[in-house]
Image (cartoon, rainbow, N blue to C red):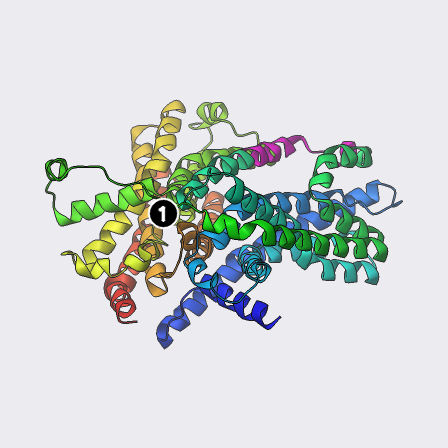
């Protein structure tokens, strides 16, 4: 037990962010943490809990109160289990096989199962620490909506921590089998490339499912809820039996069912550790390292070299890292070009009547459409720039090569500017490649189009500089794989929290402007541009000196 606790503590500490010793930076990070907590985590959890609670209450009432409806609870928990499984594969693979500590730990006098269970626990904590808030909100929403008793609450509170175990056990067993008996995965890049297709496939399926909620009707739905539950969850109940057991236990207050739920989780862990004892060691030993060599002669290499300015070379280096690294390409580049899918799903789920054809027919008839598009372009530009996290992990991406920034003949200010410009470039292209054709389709005049483009650019520039400033305060420079710098870096959440507040303020301001019927587009444009220019000036004054100073402080640590 002592070995397990010590190993787990060591592995978990490797997942955490580095801490600053500077009091001023600690205060700023604390403020950003509060923003993230109250800007993302709590609102998101409250919205999910509210949805589960209202849905459960309505379904229970419409079911004549004969029994508590657990359909929505099971739906949410099954979706969480699916995402835990999909995203957990890459986390488990990296933790079990591709961390730098493997070669040092194997010679220790430890059993294989001790190493595996410690790494599994560390991966479990790292993967589910933020997800736990949404699971808790789901249980609380269900409990309030169904008005459950004390026993049900006890089962819910005790069981929430075990829900992610079975999906992650599946991930662990699959990874060990693949690494032991195949040569499909040879390095970290193979892991990331293999999961790209799966993640996007699952994402598209979920979004299409969400879009189908546009015709959701409680009155039609509730009458056949039991039959629909049996049909819809049949396969998922076989794949994730613990979810079904937990839902039945909390819905009926069944202690026996809860004990079976505990037993299945324990049995799953035991099976995982038995398999680990049999095949994990051989999988690690047979692991192939990436041995791709550059079979290029010296003459060819010299001929291929082109001389460029330091700033241009650094710019191209940043572009190549983002495009050629699978994890960065998936999470930082591709996201800039798939955002319309999310927008489409939101509009379908809300059963909105707004279509491109409707915008085309009413753009010059309804004056409020220009205001809607103004707030939309500002909001989507801010969200996308924060979501792609290109600038909010720009310094963290350097990792162990951080001192490379000091060695090259390019000052810190220029390097940081180039990193920011790369983030601006991808965000701006990702917006304009869709927005300009839409404007052309709905016959937006050139003046309005230029206005929207200026608003988008000013918004992107503000969020991009804010992101790199936040990353300079506490970059995550210690990581073993590229996914860690994205998934275990809280700077993106800090940036996203500020963006959420920023967009809400803009939306509220747009609402009050909507009440004033006398404003024309030119006046509206000047108001928003003035606000964005002031935001950019404030960001410039904040980061003018402290941005470079933060890098110097990191260099001395």
390 in relation to 551, above or below: above
Secondary structure of the residue carrying tag 1 is helix
441 in relation to 382, above or below: above
- Pick the quarter of the image with the N terminus: bottom right
What x and y, as percent, mark residue 96? 50, 53
Magenta-highlighted stretch: main secondary structure?
helix
Looking at this view, is 151 or 261 the one in front?
Answer: 261
Quadrant of the rendered image containing residue 450: top left
Say left or right for 197 vs 431: right
The answer to if 551 sits in the magenta stretch is: no
Quadrant of the rendered image containing residue 557: bottom left
Say left or right for 23 vs 168: left
Say left or right for 60 vs 87: right
Give the residues drawn in magenta, as a range: 204-221
Label 1 Cα neighbours within 10 Å, binned few <14 / some 14-19 / many ≥20: some
Residue at the image position 47 percent from the left and 43 percent from the top: 514
Looking at this view, is 272 or 478 the one in front?
Answer: 272
Residue at which label 1 appears: 528
The answer to if 206 sits in the magenta stretch is: yes
Viewer can see residue 84? no
């Amino acid at each position: 037990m002592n070995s397990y606790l010590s190993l787990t503590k060591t592995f978990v500490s490797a997942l955490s962010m580095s801490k600053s010793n500077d009091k001023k930076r600690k205060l700023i990070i604390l403020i950003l943490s509060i923003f993230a907590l109250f800007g993302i985590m709590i609102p998101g959890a409250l919205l999910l809990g509210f949805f589960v609670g209202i849905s459960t209450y309505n379904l229970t009432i419409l079911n004549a109160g004969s029994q508590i409806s657990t359909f929505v609870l099971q739906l949410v928990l099954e979706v969480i289990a699916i995402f835990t499984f999909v995203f957990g594969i890459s986390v488990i693979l990296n933790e079990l096989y591709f961390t730098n500590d493997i070669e040092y730990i194997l010679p220790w006098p430890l059993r294989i199962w001790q190493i595996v269970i410690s790494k599994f626990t560390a991966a479990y904590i790292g993967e589910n620490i933020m997800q736990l808030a949404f699971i808790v909100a789901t249980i609380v929403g269900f409990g309030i909506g169904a008005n459950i008793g004390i026993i049900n609450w006890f089962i819910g509170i005790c069981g929430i921590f075990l829900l992610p175990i079975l999906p992650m056990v599946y991930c662990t067993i699959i990874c060990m089998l693949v690494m032991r008996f195949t040569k499909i995965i040879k390095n970290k890049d193979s892991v990331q490339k293999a999961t790209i297709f799966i993640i996007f496939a699952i994402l598209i399926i979920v979004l299409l499912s969400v879009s189908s909620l546009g015709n959701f009707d409680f009155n039609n739905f509730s009458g056949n809820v039991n039959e629909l539950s049996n049909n819809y969850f049949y396969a998922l109940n076989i794949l994730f039996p613990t979810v079904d057991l937990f839902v039945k236990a909390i819905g009926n207050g069944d202690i026996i069912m809860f004990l079976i739920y505990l037993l299945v989780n324990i049995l799953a862990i035991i099976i995982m550790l038995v398999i680990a004892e049999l095949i994990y060691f051989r999988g690690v030993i047979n692991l192939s390292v990436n041995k791709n060599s550059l079979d290029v002669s010296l003459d060819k290499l010299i001929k291929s070299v082109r001389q460029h300015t330091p700033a241009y070379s650094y710019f191209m280096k940043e572009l190549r890292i983002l495009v050629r690294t699978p994890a960065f390409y998936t999470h930082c580049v591709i996201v800039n070009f798939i955002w319309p899918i999310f927008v489409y799903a939101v509009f379908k789920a809300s059963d909105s009547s707004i279509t491109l054809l409707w915008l085309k027919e009413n753009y010059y008839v309804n004056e409020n459409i220009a205001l809607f598009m103004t707030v939309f372009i500002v909001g989507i530009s801010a969200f996308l720039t924060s979501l792609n996290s290109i600038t909010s992990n720009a310094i963290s991406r350097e990792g162990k090569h951080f001192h490379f920034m000091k060695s090259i003949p390019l000052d810190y200010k220029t390097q940081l500017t180039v990193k920011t410009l790369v983030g601006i470039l991808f965000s701006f292209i990702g917006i304009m490649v869709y927005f300009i054709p839409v404007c052309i389709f709905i016959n937006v005049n050139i003046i309005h189009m230029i206005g929207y483009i200026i608003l988008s650019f000013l918004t992107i520039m503000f969020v991009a500089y804010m992101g790199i400033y936040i990353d300079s305060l506490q970059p995550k420079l210690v990581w073993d794989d590229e996914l860690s710098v994205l998934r275990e870096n809280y700077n993106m959440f800090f940036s996203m929290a500020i963006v959420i507040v920023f967009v809400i303020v803009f939306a509220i301001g747009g609402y009050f402007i909507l009440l004033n019927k006398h404003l024309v587009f030119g006046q509206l444009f000047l108001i928003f541009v003035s606000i964005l220019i002031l935001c950019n000036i404030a960001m410039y004054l904040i980061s003018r000196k402290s941005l470079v100073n933060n890098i110097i402080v990191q260099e001395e640590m």
